[in-house]
Amino acid sequence: MVEWSDKERGIINSLFSTLDYEDIGSKTLSRCLIVYPWTQRYFANFGPLYSAEAITTNPNIAAHGVKILHGLDRAVKNMDNIKTAYTELSVLHSDKLKVDPDNFTLLSDCLTIVIAAKMGNSFNIETQATFQKFLAVVVSALRRQYH
């Protein structure tokens, strides 16, 4: 079980309360698909993904990026039991969608970059450390079904 200090909880809650989900979600998924093009195979039914511009202007990619980001709300609301909160999503991604579990880490790295760019100097060392801890727990929960 992961231990969260009151300060860490505050940092995570504050970060998510100020996020522009449409902007951050779209940029995060777009970045992941462009930087790691092999991840595109899971989105073949989202329309053409043949260039960075095609990806960044694709409304299906933008909408799914927002959906992914809102999926993190589940972890924010269940910080004491993230693994249980993500059981259903872990099963879905493992058994039905057959997503490579390493993609969760790639996406979390992209999310960190996008949020850091957006927050600038406010994304200090303490915020990053807490956010990385949070994402590591979420990624572990999503990978759980794969073990």
Image: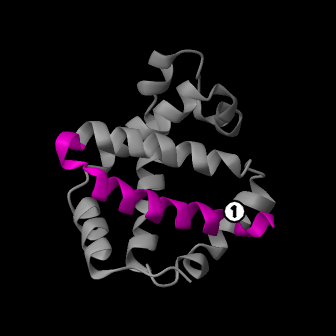
Q: Residues within 10 Å of mark 1 (few under 14, many from 20)?
A: many
In the image, residue 47 above or below residue 85? above
Q: Main secondary structure of the magenta part?
A: helix
Colour style of the rendered protein structure: one colour
Q: Is 137 one of the magenta-colored residues?
A: yes
In what quadrant of the picture does the C terminus appear?
Answer: bottom right
Measuring from the top left, give residue 145's x and y in whole percent: 76, 68
- Magenta residue span: 119-147
In the image, residue 95 above or below residue 30? below
In this orientation, which residue lies closer to the viewer: 57 or 86?
Answer: 86
For image coordinates 41% across by 60% down, the residue present is 70
| Three-letter code, disc 1 | Arg
For image coordinates 79% across by 63% down, the residue present is 146
Measuring from the top left, give residue 61's x and y in whole percent: 49, 37
For image coordinates 60% across by 81% down, the residue present is 84
As drawn, is 95 to the left or to the right of 109? right
Name the quadrant containing residue 77.
Answer: bottom left
Residue at the extreme front: 125
Q: Which residue is mark 1?
A: 143
Residue 26, can we see it? no
For image coordinates 78% across by 52% down, the residue present is 98
